[in-house]
Amino acid sequence: MPRRTATMLASTLVLIALLCAGVLIRVPYAEMSPGPTVNTLGEHDGEPVLQIAGRKTYPTDGHLNMTTVRVTSADYRMNLVEAVYGWLAHDDKVVPHDTLYPDGKTEEQSTQENAEEFSQSQESAKVAALEALHIPVRSWVIVSTVVKDSPAEGKLHAGDVIKAVDGTAVKEPGDVAKLVTRHKPGQDVVFTIVPAKEQAAAEKANRTATTTEKVTITTAKSDDSGARRAVVGISAGTDHTFPFSIDIKLADVGGPSAGLMFALGIYDKLTPGSLTGGAFVAGTGTIDDEGKVGPIGGIEMKTVGARSKGARYFLTPAENCAAAAKDTPGGLRLVKVSTIDDALDALKDIRSGDTDALPKCTTKG
């Protein structure tokens, strides 16, 4: 066999061997890529994304698109070839597996956590939108979860309204932990609550719950390494009663990052005229009850997904600006926002054509 032919054959065999090895070798990485975008003013799977009843609504146009990121599943392990391809691909991002699924979190656990965050983001979006419209929303602190085998198990239940701790009125979820940790482990703490069933009955009858109970719980020591904080084994949250019905219909989406766009969609439907002036606006960002916009993950994937669908403007959380500005898709303008009021001001500039006034994202933030 001629030397040149033998060399080519050997090189081919080595290449095949390397490719086979690359396919067989599993690496601890996961992949993120642009996911679907959905217009919160439009329909999804044949029904309106935002459904409001009991209050006058107004026609809208344009787009206020929420954006998503696709990720590989928790139990999927990329091979070396896929990882290298992902590193080289412009629109995908390969990250350590533990970044997306820390502490060995399973697919089921991640899905459940994302569903809970998505549900909470919807509630906060409703509150933020109505607060921006000066429509009163009734709120109270509740027991969100009870830890299994904790001192509170069987004594407090999810949905119980926490009125006071040791006689001190509770106004926000953070008050509960502050009041409990004034104790030493082993000491008693007294909760004044409205039981969840009584609260549900009161809401159904459109009345204020008046039946309260006092529950005494002996605190335990926190499991935190080196800590000796007193705990009872609950997490506190906030529940609301809205003056009319607001439903968000969007399946197969998780996490809190659509909060801002849901809030803007609700605001638009409850006000005359169009917030966008017919423009294609997309965006992302968590939102809390006070309307503060927080950062999200996968910003680079979301801007790519938004631009590919036709977005011209992208409402970007201030804390994500630097990352988004490093590789902005052509034709997409990043707009820096920190609150729902910032976003409303930006939309006013967009529909008026005064885009020079829009706050910009830079690589410095």
Image (cartoon, grey):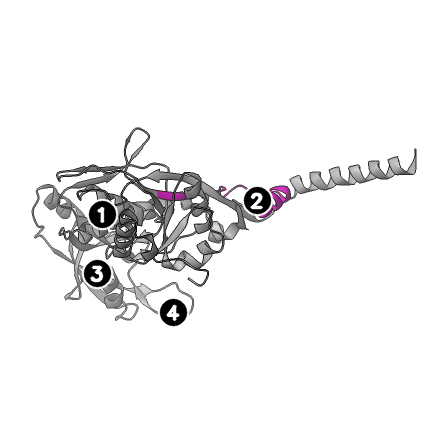
Q: Quadrant of the C terminus?
A: bottom left
Q: Residues within 10 Å of mark 3 (few under 14, many from 20)?
A: some
Q: CA distance from mark 4 to mark 1?
A: 37 Å
Helix, strand or loop at mark 3: loop
Which one is in front in this view, the residue at disc 2 or the one at disc 3?
A: 2
- Which tag, 3 or 1, sits closer to the chain's start? 1
Helix, strand or loop at mark 4: loop
Which one is in front in this view, the residue at disc 4 or the one at disc 1?
A: 1
Helix, strand or loop at mark 1: helix
Q: Residue at x 78, y 40 (%)?
A: 14
Reply yes or no: does residue 73 show up in magenta: yes
Q: Residues within 10 Å of mark 4 (few under 14, many from 20)?
A: few
Which one is in front in this view, the residue at disc 4 or the one at disc 3?
A: 3
Quick check: can you spot residue 148?
no
Q: Which residues are magenta?
A: 66-88
- Which tag, 4 or 2, sits closer to the chain's start? 2
User: In this figure, which residue is indicated by the disc labeled 1?
Assistant: 126
**Is 255 on the left or on the right of 248, as rendered?**
right
User: In this figure, which residue is indicated by the disc labeled 2?
Assistant: 89
Q: CA distance from mark 2 to mark 3?
A: 46 Å
Amino acid type shown at disc 3: Glu
User: In this figure, which residue is indicated by the disc labeled 4?
Assistant: 227
Q: Residues within 10 Å of mark 2 (few under 14, many from 20)?
A: few
* C-beta proximity under 8 Å, tags 4 and 3: no
Amino acid type shown at disc 4: Ala
Residue 172's disc number: 3
Helix, strand or loop at mark 2: loop
